[in-house]
Amino acid sequence: MIPALLRPLAAAAAATVDPDADVDALVPTNNPANGDYQWNFAFRMAKARRENPRALAERLLPFFVGRPGVAKAEVAGPGFLNLYLDDTWLAQALVAQAGDAAFGLPQSGAGKLAIIDFSSPNVAKRMHVGHMRSTHLGHVLSLVHRAAGWTVIGDNHIGDWGTPFGKLIVAWDHWRDQRGYDADPVGELERLYVLFGEKSEAKEGAGVHLADRARDETAKLQRGDPRNTSLWEQFRTASLAEYDAVYARMGVRFEEVLGESAYGGMTDAVIDGLLAAGVAEESDGAVIVRLGEQVSVVRKKDGAATYTATDLACVKYRMERWNPTKMVYVTDGRQHQHFMTFFAVAARDNVAAELVHMGFGMLKLPDGAMSTRKGNVIRLVELLDEAVARARAIVDEKSGTLDEAERASIAEAVGVGAVRYQDLVQSPGTDITFDWDRMLAMDGNSAPYLLYTRARAASLLRKAAAAGHTPDLDALTLDHPRERELALAMLRFPEAVESALRATAPNLVAEATYRLCEAFNRFFHELHVLTGGDRLASRLALTFTADRLLVRALRLLGLVPLDRM
Ligand code: ARG
């Protein structure tokens, strides 16, 4: 709403200086003394043009002064334009936003399709925290794209092909513990995989023999050998069942689960195509693509297709099947080089979609906080259970009057939400440390705080209803600075979502939601809605719009809004 008001004014002003000027740099201010938005265009341009920035700013000022919606515009500091929005205009914009199905978010994705490749654990192994982060970030990215009108295909590109299966089959035949498998299939498969590694590392005798056998079993599987195929299917199904239990708890769904195996039969043709097109070349028995100084191997000497070759086959398949505008791959930042190389080869191969790698930092688990094996391998279900148990203790303490079933569902939403939110709130690139206390804090930038704020709004609306007051948006006006702040935080929310889309940064949505909550809480504490006298109707309308938007914002973050807490 606000950009729709200010951008055209800025564009008209900028065009008198430079027709190609970038007017996006209209930024919301944090200090109301500097207006609601600030434009530093004159300051930037004057430098480049060796003009006096304040003089240039004065020349641009008339484009804003006296315009509908703009209460005041002034030149400030070394050449900034400070813009103050009109209260009546803000109130009307807010009512319009409340009535918009997309809460004022421009539908920039209408008619476009995005594929979000996320979660993607490796079959027969536990999901590790990296996959958990990918699941949370990819899920929110999908929701954010959908909100902006995109059609989204969420694709779980599981690792379900290649040499690990030959090893597993050999280990299965030698050492399987059937009872262990029946009780905990993925745990047993993981044990077998680790055991294979240990035994085959012995260089002499059995070690060599095991490694050869594993290679044979992999080759047999890839040729479609019935026994190996059926074992592979069994391992895959058991793993997916475990993953699905985690996804269900996190409210995550995928449109497709096309793992690496789906492309097993396509890599040869893709590599041959690259060779025929002169993109790839043979080198020392392998097939490579030269990228400047770098070399990307697509087929190894032993004839096996690489991870890159699989991704190339996959990207071609997706182009043919969905013709997406963009594809976002959400993985650990350590795979960045792989994606940069693969994107470069794909570009040579005329893949037209925009390819984005969203890499994220590590999540460090504090020592002893939970059972970890081999560094970061944890059972995600256990982690969620622990979070829910901790949330339950807080709920029991704070809301002892609610019945058992409601306390349980609140604890589930708070616990799972807390784990999710700590992944979302940081800028994706940074490493984070798992911190139960911070994650579950009732104040501070945490899921419980956000959920509690919304529950507070809902409770206020219930009390109003009980007293016979129904919210009426026509009554909404802005009178007090706390009301105005809340209105601005709401109107800026869709702008933050747009930025999150542009920058592939879900943390910007988290940040805007947190600001929204802070503004709501200040409003709530300082102004008494139900005893507001002649301001009651307006403040109730404001609370109502805030409540609606909070629900949307929480859902966008994959959190489950609560009516009470
Ligand atoms: N399975 C991989 C891993 O666990 C991630 C796959 C990411 N997606 C892709 N298209 N390469 O590291």
Image (tube, helix red, strand yellow):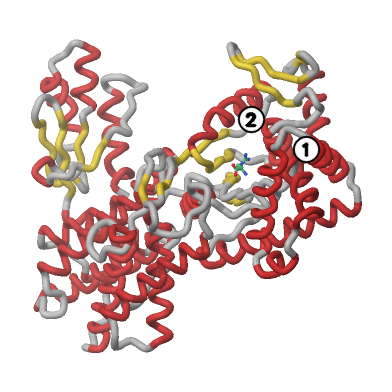
Outermost residue, front side: 204
Q: Which element type, helix, strand or loop, lies under badge 2?
A: loop
What mark, if any, has residue 352 been given in the picture? Answer: 2
Residue 149 in view, yes or no:
no
Give the answer, above or below, for where 245 lies relative to 312.
below
Q: Which element type, helix, strand or loop, lies under badge 1?
A: helix
- Name the amino acid, label 1: Ala
Residue 15: image quadrant is top left
Position of residue 147 measured from the top left corner of the image (x, y, whole percent): 47, 54
Position of residue 125 measured from the top left corner of the image (x, y, whole percent): 63, 52
> Which residue is disc 1 drawn over?
211
Please state which of residues 243 and 433 is positioned toward the viewer in this rendering: 433
Quadrant location, ligand no. 1: top right
Residue 229 in view, yes or no:
yes
- Name the amino acid, label 2: Ala
Residue at horizontal 11 percent and vertical 20 percent from the top:
55
Q: Is the C-beta separation of discs 1 and 2 under 8 Å?
A: no
Residue 414 is left or right of residue 261, and the answer is: left
Residue at horizontal 25 percent and vertical 28 percent from the top:
13
Q: Which of marks 1 and 2 is in front?
A: 1
Position of residue 103 measured from the top left corner of the image (x, y, whole percent): 38, 58
Quadrant, the C terminus: bottom left
Give neighbour class at mark 1: few <14, some 14-19, many 20+ (Cα, 10 Å). many
Please state which of residues 13 and 117 is positioned toward the viewer in this rendering: 117
Residue 161: image quadrant is top right
What mark, if any, has residue 387 been given in the picture? Answer: none
Measured in 3D between alpha carbons, the distance from the residue under mark 1 to the one under mark 2, in whole angstroms, is: 41 Å
Does the numbered disc 1 mark a residue whose Cβ is under 8 Å from ligand 1?
no
